[in-house]
Image: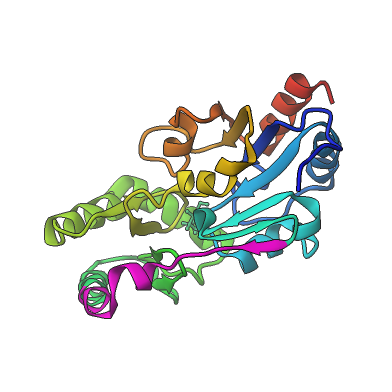
Amino acid sequence: MSFADREQPKTICLFDVDGTLTPARLSISPEMKATLQALRKKCVIGFVGGSDFSKQVEQLGSDVLDQFDFCFSENGLTAYKLGQALPSASFIGWIGEEKYNELTKFILRYLADLDLPVRRGTFIEFRKGMVNVSPIGRNASTQERNDYEKYDLEHKIREKMVQALKDNFPDLPLTYSIGGQISFDVFPTGWDKTYCLRHIESEGFEQIHFFGDKAYKGGNDYEIYTDERTIGHAVKNPEDTQAILKELFKL
Ligand code: M1P
């Protein structure tokens, strides 16, 4: 299906979710929703986030498949075009049970030996395209998240843990990405946000704009932001995203 109903059918805007379309882990604002719907008249729109689809539904709304032309969860391992599922891949299929076991045993032992002021639950989240590791645990409240982020910055908990993983699994082609407040993602090298671009390769887009707030080296938007196929826009927050869109597309 083409996008001939758009003013610029050969242009697509792809958005990171946390910090770009929504405040971290929170819901999209009515203003951002309205801006995106105005943009959708001009060009094709999609989002690409590291979280799984159910979390993106919580943040972007239960009608997300109707609101975006392309929905890319877990960097595009789960993908939809105009509400229809596209072919998907999985981390466990790639790594195999044996190696995965070795990796999680190491992670759990390492976490158990950490001295931390606060621990909550869900330290490893098994996702389709990656594992997400959180020293405090993903059940932390918003306040606990904010406190942990500061603690982590000071004590470099995640940075040191990533180094330990790299040292202990030198042969596994894995990428470690500290993209959020309390955790880091572990996924096969190349399965970063550029993964989603393979789903739109055959669409013949002439301009692929990407907007992300973690476009700096080491951030989880860096690879797609710097990819030669995209025009990257580094944003400070959702308000900044809206301001850039209004300027670029005369909304
Ligand atoms: O989208 C950025 C990151 O958001 C969450 O990170 P955290 O819970 O640490 O703030 C996670 O969903 C993570 O996978 C994702 O990269």
Which colour assignment does the render follow?
A: rainbow
Q: Is residue 150 above or below residue 164?
A: above
- Residue 95, image x and y in percent? 29, 69
Please give the range of residues in magenta.
84-102
Residue 88 lies within the magenta run: yes
- Residue 180 in the image: state x and y as whole percent: 47, 51
Q: Describe residue 123's horizontal placement relative to residue 71 as left or right.
A: left
Does the magenta portion include 63? no
When the figure is inspected, residue 227 is found, relative to residue 176, above or below; the finding is: above
Please tell me which residue lies in front, 212 or 135: 212
The quadrant holding residue 165 is bottom left
In the image: residue 168, left or right of residue 130: left
For the point 24% across and 67% down, which residue is it? 114
Q: Nearer the viewer, residue 205 or 185?
A: 205
Tell me the residue at 38%/72% (across/down): 124
Residue occupying the point 47% across, 49% down: 195
Would residue 23 be seen by someone viewing this image from the given angle? Answer: no
Residue 12 drawn at (x, y percent): 68, 35
Q: Quadrant of residue 86?
A: bottom right
